[in-house]
Amino acid sequence: MLFPDCSTSRFAKISLAIVLILIPIMFYYGKWADATDHYFTYAEYVISGMVPYRDFDFEYPPLAMLFMVIPGLFTSNRDVYCILYAFQSLAFFIVGVYYVGLIAKKNGTHNGRMMLLLLMTLAMANIFVIARNDIYPTVFCIMSFYYFLNKKYAASWVLLCLGVMTKMYPLVLAPALFIPFLIRKDYFGALRGIAVCVAVCLLISLPFIISDPSTAFSYLTYHLDRGLQIESVASSFIMFFNIFDPSLISVSFGYGSYNIDGELPDIIAYSLNYVLPLVLLAIFAWVLVRLYRVRTHADTVHVRIIVVLASLEVVLAFMTFSKVFSAQYVIWALMLLTITQFACLNGRIKNEILMLAFLYGILSMINGDLTCTYLIQLNTVAIVVVLLRNIVQIALMIDTLRLISFEIDSEKGHAGSDDGFPAETQSTTINEKI
């Protein structure tokens, strides 16, 4: 087979080897960035008795602080902290590998395609996997998907909320997970899920609410007034036009990132505050209505797979229409794209997604490791690289939407047993044997 099987234990060893190579490289080139500039400092604050939000500004939800503090409990040395943080991130990445392996095993197919996407994540997102906090919410999402696919909804919602309380983006995919309940008109089940989510989030936030209710949720409004971050999809197109008319924009620093300023960027940044939620709502409504029309069983495993794909589509749309698109967001896309490689899905489209993901990873690696810093000077090569990555981002969003549409149309052919993931359809068998 083109994509041979790879056991979780073997992949864990490969991952460890890559991280052991990355750590000295990162020290040599000084690439620890957020881990040294922010996470280590935040950990020192908390260990000294300061409270996030009340005593110092903290842009992330409260659970993110836990992952920053843990390495700081074992050392006060900044360099040692970075190493410990890297291995903590690796451990969480391996948890993600384990759950992807469980999904592949349940799927009844080889996991080569899924593991390839995980390898691309570690190799192409490299420094961002072990020195940023994006790996944690992404793994929580994967774990949530696994339990959702197995109809263990309470566990799925709890894990998704842990992701939201680490970084806000998993919140956008939460509504899609209620689609099966809405299709079968199980409104009590949906309300119960909402209650679980609210309870988990409030429980995690409770110490900070008690400490100072006026600041406990300050992270929710942190990004509202910021401009277009320099790597965002909208920014990349504006910067490209700026090559031919250099008077369009300027670059400034704010909210922890470089943003572009000017009349056009300001208008678009303001507009995206409204466009983004409308796009996400439209995707949710489109999937819900189409599934409702073709449903043969309200909660078959194939419906749940479509719902998980819809969750991925929402994340991709969030990245595309957001004002912010930091280099480490590649982790979200590549790791969650593993779910597009189920054996039962349309072979031609998922092959396209796999090839696009490889190109996406390469361009993300070039941008994140080499050209990103040159965007500040509006360097033409750097602009072209990030523009091409963002065009591929749009293509991945469109292809995932096509995959969802195809699978909804074929839902009647998947209305059988719910004892496991559906087997390959006739349309995908040939493709899977390539």
Image (tube, helix red, strand yellow):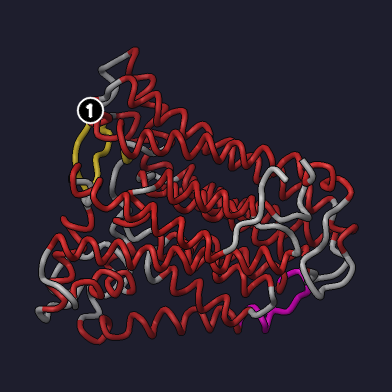
Between 188 and 87, the one nearer to me in the picture: 87
Q: Quadrant of residue 433?
A: top right
Q: Residue 17: x percent and y percent?
A: 39, 55
Up-down relation of residue 266 to residue 173 (above or below): above
Position of the C terminus, as image quadrant, is top right
Q: Residue at x 24, y 34 (%)?
A: 373
- Does the segment drawn in magenta span residue 177? no
Q: Which residue is denoted by mark 1 in the rendering?
A: 250
Is residue 396 rendered to the left or right of residue 420?
left
Up-down relation of residue 174 to residue 402 (above or below): below
Q: Residue at x 31, y 61 (%)?
A: 221
SS under mark 1:
strand
Up-down relation of residue 131 to residue 366 (above or below): below
- State the extent of the magenta-drawn residues as a range: 182-191
Q: Examine the residues drawn in magenta and state their main secondary structure.
A: helix
In this figure, what is the number of numbered marks? Answer: 1
Q: Residue at x 47, y 47 (%)?
A: 319
Q: Residue 112: x percent and y percent?
A: 64, 52
- Does the segment drawn in magenta span residue 184? yes
Is residue 238 rendered to the left or right of residue 414?
left
Q: Residue 200: x percent and y percent?
A: 45, 82
Q: Amino acid at mark 1?
A: Ser
Q: Residue 169: x percent and y percent?
A: 44, 59
